[in-house]
Amino acid sequence: MDLARLTLKDCEEIEEFFVASTGMKPGFTQLSAGLINFTVECVDLDGVTLIWSGNEGCHRWHDEAPETGLHFAFAVSAEEPILFQGREVDQSQMAMWQPEAEMDFLMKGKTASIDIGIEQELLEELGWNVSGPPVMGIPEETRARLTSTCKAIRRAAQLQSLPKRPEYAQAIIQAWRDQLLDDLQDVVMPWGAKECPAAKSADRPTPYQLIRLAETFFNGLPPDQMPDMENLSKEIGVSRRSLFRAFQEHLGLGPRRYFELKRLNMLRRDLKAHVPDEATVTDLALKNGFVQFGRLSQLYKNQFGELPSTTLRARSN
């Protein structure tokens, strides 16, 4: 198959791409200001989807895997440590999305990664039936071999996309696709054989667990209401200081700022989904809990590089 190259500029484009190409439902939240410029190179093989991706800035991914199939991902390079549910993961580790699993990653700085999706029909043909922890270390030689095979597939797809591509290009891609499955076999087998490590004591919630509790409270609020930090702290049974430190430790910003960014992302989705004749910026701002419109305009522009009205008008063009 040909190589598809895309630059995805906002959360809607990112979510649409992954739903269409993998069935994944990515909950993407932009935490750093500026353009996202999330780049992807996608090769759609027979039962296998290979995606090279690169991004900069700070983003949180709270993904929901499809109902069938398996999905693997690992970092090729990362300027900053990647956090999975509040714990650091490094380039010696790989993540596996099992059906309907929820995955939560925080990425900071420039990151390049490889995603490999395997369709259910192919899994049954291969006889793969795996379970275990969502993140596991893999031997360096296995990871290096897997990366090398993915690079070869990308080169072969680039060759095939040329106007005068050789007749043997498709055969080359098929051979490398089979090699990729052989490489993954070395990853999948020990994954299925190991058990999840014992969970840490639940006597004291981890910073990540506190954030998840706070998000549950936030998600239960009416759309037009911003959370009060005092009530939020009491609701989850910790001091405001403990809650603030949990957010700072895991996300690098306080809870008030984080939920403000969540609302800004929700507002941006609404603005991009409407045209000026259907709703006004004021209507949609109020719906998402913003009442100080002058401050909102500045916050929005600082985060996304344009005014809310510009986003709304762009929908009608």
Image (spheres, grey):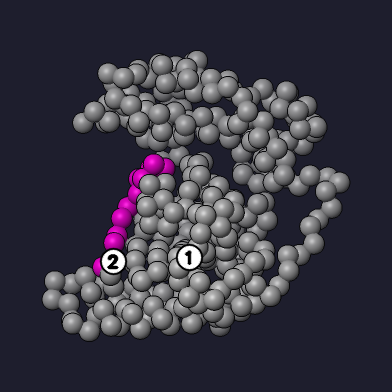
Task: Look at 32% across and 78% down and name the residue there.
Answer: 173
Precedes in sequence: disc 2 or disc 1: 2
Task: Look at 86% across and 46% down and name the residue there.
Answer: 203
Q: Which residue is mark 1?
A: 120
Q: Is residue 179 above or below residue 163?
A: below
Q: Give me the C-alpha separation between circle 2 and circle 1.
A: 23 Å
Q: Secondary structure at mark 1?
A: helix
Q: Is residue 14 above or below residue 154?
A: above
Task: Look at 48% across and 42% down and name the residue there.
Answer: 30
Image quarter in which the C terminus is found: top left
Q: Which quadrant of the structure image shows residue 307?
A: top left
Drawn side of residue 154 relative to residue 298, left or right: left
Q: What x and y, as percent, mark residue 177?
A: 39, 78
Span shown in magenta:
2-14
Q: Secondary structure at mark 2?
A: strand
Disc 1 packing (10 Å; few <14; some 14–19; many ≥20): some
Whether 5 is among the magenta residues is yes
Q: What x and y, as percent, mark residue 38?
A: 39, 52
Q: Is residue 205 above or below residue 232?
A: below
Q: Residue furthest left?
A: 164
**Is residue 198 visible in this depiction of the protein?**
yes
Res 229 label: none
Drawn side of residue 4 relative to residue 211, left or right: left
Task: Look at 42% across and 46% down and name the residue there.
Answer: 15
Amino acid on which disc 1 is placed: Gln
Q: What x and y, as percent, mark residue 156?
A: 29, 77
Whether 287 is among the magenta residues is no
Q: Which residue is mark 2?
A: 3
Amino acid on which disc 2 is placed: Leu
